[in-house]
Amino acid sequence: MDLGIKGKTALVLGASGGLGGAIAEALAAEGVNVAIAGRNMDALKARAATIGNSVKVLPLVWELSALDMIESHFETIERQLGSVDILINNTGGPPPSTASGVDAAAWSRAFDSMVLPVIKITDRALQAMKEKRWGRIITSTSSGILAPIPNLGVSNSLRSALLGWSKSLAREVAPFGITANIVLPGRIATPRIAQLDKARSTREGIDVEAVVKDSLAQIPAGRYGEPHEYGDAVAFLASARASYMTGSVIRVDGGYISHV
């Protein structure tokens, strides 16, 4: 199926990581030029190498909490690739924590790195999207917004804020031909999931293998997802074929989330 997005420009946040990188690769495979943003240039260059030379790839070292850098980064993208048609909001998560007893400064740091940058970067991308009357805003969050994950109190809370924001935004931008959707990963085999499995192993005093076995028992598909499977789902949401899908929450989880 031709997704109808060849030649468009995407900005993928957190693109040096497992999910963001897989999304960037899936979009590039559809002929989309991609700006890949992350904190480490070496990691971004490695990701660019996996994408290859079939499209233009622009690595950008981007500290999301530095809101004053948003404009200059967008100017660089627009100068080298054109205005952003597809925005992938994908941020790292905070360290494991309870929902109570967390220092106020820790809540503020997490908000400033996970929530506020997503909102302000989206505001900047919307300028050109509204002029062209076409755009895709896809925010990758966590299954914790539907089924709170134990010991991820801060993450569950702040990612839920993005759910309310995205749903509200979808209604505002639909008249401009712009869609806004949330995508939820289940247990996708990324370094982040490996980190969380290890944290649970330490917390509960059990082997990591036992943690993984318990997780697999809760996934009807019987396995962790592969990053490329997540990337492919996001690429479809970014496509011309998904023009009537907006305000939605799409699960890519192998049936892991049991809630209706």
Image (spheres, rainbow, N blue to C red):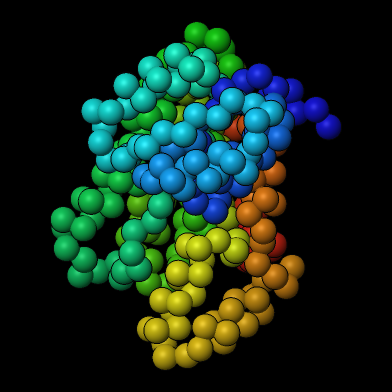
Residue 101, image quadrant? bottom left
Q: Position of residue 181 (x, y in %)?
A: 56, 37
Q: Residue at x 45, y 30 (%)?
A: 169
Q: Give the mark count.
A: 0
Q: Residue at x 42, y 72 (%)?
A: 150
Farthest right residue in view: 1
183 or 74: nearer the eye? 74
Side (left or right) of 63 relative to 254: left
Q: Quadrant of the C terminus?
A: bottom right
Residue 133, image quadrant? top right
Q: Quadrant of the N terminus?
A: top right
Q: Is residue 126 visible?
A: no
Q: Position of residue 242 (x, y in %)?
A: 70, 30
Side (left or right) of 218 relative to 114: right
179 or 20: nearer the eye? 20
26 or 139: nearer the eye? 26
Q: Position of residue 28 (x, y in %)?
A: 65, 33
Q: Position of residue 80 (x, y in %)?
A: 48, 17
